Amino acid sequence: MNGASETQATMAKELETPAVILGLCKAIYRICLEHARERVQGGKPIIQHPTVGSMLTEMAMIIDVQEAYMYDITVCIRRIRTMIEGSHGSENIRSPSPCTGPLS
């Protein structure tokens, strides 16, 4: 395996765990949302209670941020891969920055 392939394999492995965690978070959120719609307390579904609604909203926002961050990291890694594949060792892959945007 050459250096570029090893780098690509390492980058893919580094994304694997966060992607799995994001999937688990989405599944847990769906379970919580379904439960909040079905569970009745005080004569109404608990999703209509302000505290429960706030908690579910916060969960949804955190998941959205995680997903956007994963997308940005994936784009960054693709740019790095392109630079590595195009450089063939002759260019400095650190300049210009392959990851530009609000998270860099």
Image: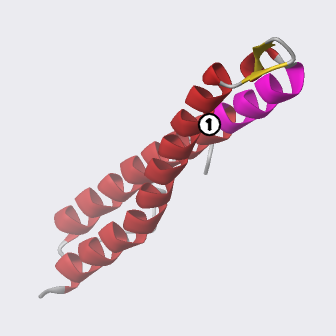
- Residue at (32%, 77%) from the top-left corner? 10
Q: Quadrant of the N terminus?
A: bottom left
Indicate whether 9 appears above or below 2: above
| 93 vs 9, nearest the viewer | 9
Q: Residue furthest left?
A: 1
- The image position of residue 78, as x and y in percent, is 30, 54
- In this image, 50 relative to 68: left or right? right
The verdict on residue 59 being magenta is yes
- In this image, 85 relative to 59: left or right? left
Residue 90 visible at all: no
Q: Identify the secondary structure beneath mark 1.
A: helix
Image colouring: secondary structure
Q: Quadrant of residue 14?
A: bottom left
| 65 vs 11, nearest the viewer | 65
| 19 vs 49, nearest the viewer | 49
| 7 vs 60, nearest the viewer | 60
In the picture of the structure, the residue carrying the numbered disc 1 is 32
- The image position of residue 12, as x and y in percent, is 31, 67
Residue 45 visible at all: yes
Q: Quadrant of residue 47?
A: top right
**Residue range corresponding to the magenta coloring:** 50-60
Indicate whether 34 appears above or below 91: above
- The image position of residue 21, as x and y in percent, is 49, 58
- Residue at (67%, 33%) from the top-left corner? 61
Mark 1 crowd level (few <14, some 14–19, many ≥20, 10 Å Cα) = some
Secondary structure mostly seen in the magenta stretch: helix
The verdict on residue 103 being magenta is no
- The image position of residue 77, as x and y in percent, is 37, 58
Amino acid at circle 1:
Cys
- Residue at (68%, 25%) from the top-left corner? 39
